[in-house]
Amino acid sequence: MKSFSVLILDPRGVISGGKNDVTERHSNYGKELTKQSKKMDYRLKVLSASTQKVSTTNNNKTFEILNITKPTFNSYKFAKNAYKYIESNMLSVKLLVAGDPWESYWSAYFLSRLLNRDIPIQIQVHGDIADPRWRRINLKNRVRYSLAKLSLPKASSVRAVTKFQAENLINSFGIKRERLAIVPVPINILSKTVNLKTDRPETIGLVGRIHPDRGIWEFLQLIRVLNLSSKDFKVVVIGSGLGKDKFLLKLEAIIPKNRIIYLGQLPESELRKAWKKIGVLVSMAPVESYGRVMRESLIAGVPVWATASAGVKDLLDNCKKGEVKLLDLSKSSASLEKDFNLLLKTKVSSDFSKKFVKENNTYAAKLASSWINTIKKSK
């Protein structure tokens, strides 16, 4: 029986350069797509970019990652390479999936023109790019916002990750509501059990990429203000990034080195154990569409202290009162210390973990379903 292809375009090599969980996630997408396609026999292929021409295929061949060129920001160049691959392998393409509204979308746009076919395009939007604060982070984001203004209204469908992010996209980009699919990104559950104890260590945790767009300088401001009222707490930092060295130097200028625990970039197995060292997770990213680390924190039984964002609003809707608290830097040091101490005493219920695990297991099927529906609607 003839198979049909759903192609994910990845000109910058984000997927092929990702970790094992990225490959596993896309493999699950492929399995669900083939499972739901019935007589059509859809197969998922990722046309990606890498310095090495290698391919990854799952056991049942419902999914492949194919590196067809080197990473590039040149959408037309990538589209030409994708066109050559499609023609030489005689693929019957039913849907193009763009991993972002800029390079990936324009690669899909040019590819559809080269194929001389009106192929539907779904754009994946992972960040909360409609939040005005996202545009203010840097010049690159402002340019990308302008590109998204052109691409998003043209898409056959748009995948968002939370309902709050979706509303922002509708209001800012004029996307028709019926073209939106809200499907969070499935994650590997690192913590299998919830720590229901309230006698957690008096520590503040910063977990993830250490980069200015993650609010690391605002985090330093929080530590500086808290330190005015308390000299007992410690700071646990897990992760790495371009801003790591400068960040750690500035942190050491605020509190003594013996109150800083830097664990670096940890593999999944070690990160699971490290949650025991954290009393409260702090997230000060100015824009957060979903909040993967915040969800992992709650699953591990660690409450979250975070600045307002679409992802935080979604969490507040899905957990019990007090488990996630909004962080307001305009408060006095005494008020912030009070909030911190309340969070340290907060017992995180296992309800969030149970609900999240159940819903997380449905996301691959929901995304595959959105692809099939996009194909059907385009006929």
Image (tube, rainbow, N blue to C red):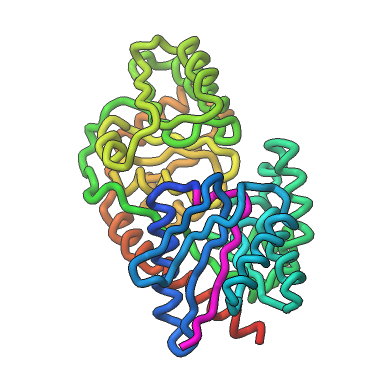
The span picked out in magenta is 1-16
Residue 287 shown in magenta: no
Q: Nearer the viewer, residue 228 or 188?
A: 188
Q: Quadrant of residue 235?
A: top left
In the depicted structure, whether residue 72 falls above or below residue 68: above
Q: Residue at x 34, y 53 (%)?
A: 188
Residue 8 shown in magenta: yes
In the depicted structure, whether residue 336 falls above or below residue 295: above
Q: Is residue 325 left or right of residue 288?
A: left
Secondary structure, magenta segment, majority class: loop
Total numbered badges shown on the rendered structure: 0
Q: Is residue 157 left or right of residue 193?
A: right
Picture coordinates of residue 317 (x, y %)? 45, 57
Q: Residue at x 47, y 27 (%)?
A: 335
Q: Is residue 103 left or right of residue 323?
A: right
Q: Residue at x 38, y 58 (%)?
A: 24
Residue 16 in view of the camera:
yes
In the depicted structure, whether residue 132 falls above or below residue 24: above
Q: Nearer the viewer, residue 156 or 168?
A: 156
Q: Nearer the viewer, residue 308 or 132?
A: 132
Say which quadrant the C terminus sits in.
bottom right
Q: Nearer the viewer, residue 141 or 135?
A: 141
Q: Quadrant of residue 79?
A: bottom right
Q: Residue at x 28, y 34 (%)?
A: 274
